[in-house]
Image (cartoon, rainbow, N blue to C red):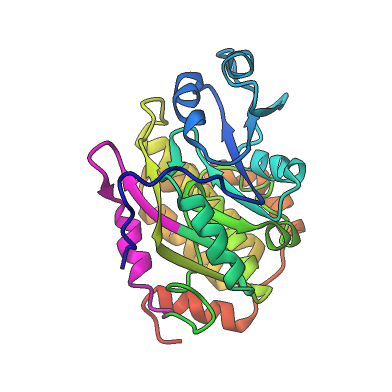
Amino acid sequence: MTVPRSAGQPRSPAPDVTVVVASRNRRDDLLATLPRHEAPVLLVDNASTDDTVAAVRAAHPEVTVLPLDANEGAHGRTLGAARAGTPFLAFADDDSWWAPGDLARAVEIMRAHPRLALINARILVGPEERLDPVCAEMADSPLGTPADLPGPALLGFVACAALVRTEAFEAVGGFDPVVRFPGEEERVALDLAAAGWGLAYVDQVTIHHHPSTRREAPGRRQAGIWRSRLLTALMRLPAGDVARTVGRAVRAGRPGVEGVLRALPDIPAALRRRRPLPDRVRSGLRLLAGERA
């Protein structure tokens, strides 16, 4: 149940947390959303060509900007995290921000639950504040709610709505340079669970997400997701599951096939990072997939 908040409640700064934003060629979105953050912001610019870096430095000199020479995708967040120096990291996209007061509230929840590595907040989409359908799925997680977690347990998350414990995030390598984007969350979530950390959906805290108009075409994005699924499977799942992932991609049609083809150059790098998951995490994945554990 969502904890109500007074409409007149003032914003309170979130302690010991840095908001890490990774962006590319979304200058106007950034200029609108950066002032909404209630903690120090570290912007990782993935080699934008729209003068993002200069515009942000001029309009928001309080923001730390890390300009990259190449598009690192989600791995840019890992590079930003290394510069943050705070015990907690809040990830936001250039078109998302935490609701007033909720970042500080999320930090308090994290401090109260020592095994908790990651909170996925409730996501409200657009000015009409529609609940993102993924939140309903998370709230109904078949993994249940362990006694030492503040909400339903997860084996995945949405990066733009996540607060993470820096210690845990760095211990599993953060977002890697192989998967990149989109679909970068799965490998991180699985590795956190394998290391014994907890991930939870917490609807007492909220993220606002107003999707940018500068987005990839849906078919290209789906191809990217299939690419990430395959590379993650190669890094963490048994050979049979990898084969089944390829089969599902092919049956998905053009986006799936394109995703497999886009994954081919990165297969050697994925295999070098291969570390199969323990049985207990694979059992959780089967439960999420509707299979008997």
* Horizontal and vertical percent position of residue 143: 43, 79
User: Which residues fall within the magenta stretch?
Assistant: 121-144
In the picture, measured across the screen, residue 282 lies left or right of residue 5, that is right
Magenta stretch contains residue 136: yes
Q: Quadrant of residue 261?
A: top right
Residue 173, can we see it? yes
Residue 185 vertical placement versus 70 (above, below): below
In this view, the residue in front, 245 or 280, is 280
* Horizontal and vertical percent position of residue 40: 63, 38
* Residue occupying the point 51% across, 44% down: 182
Residue 237, can we see it? no
In this view, the residue in front, 61 or 219, is 61
In this view, the residue in front, 96 or 248, is 96
* Residue occupying the point 34% across, 59% down: 135
* Horizontal and vertical percent position of residue 164: 60, 57
In this view, the residue in front, 95 or 292, is 95
* Horizontal and vertical percent position of residue 1: 31, 68
In the picture, measured across the screen, residue 131 lies left or right of residue 208, that is left
Residue 161 vertical placement versus 246 (above, below): above
Q: Quadrant of residue 192?
A: bottom right
Residue 117 vertical placement versus 147 (above, below): above
* Residue occupying the point 44% across, 61% down: 247
Residue 69 vertical placement versus 282 (above, below): above
* Residue occupying the point 38% across, 41% down: 209
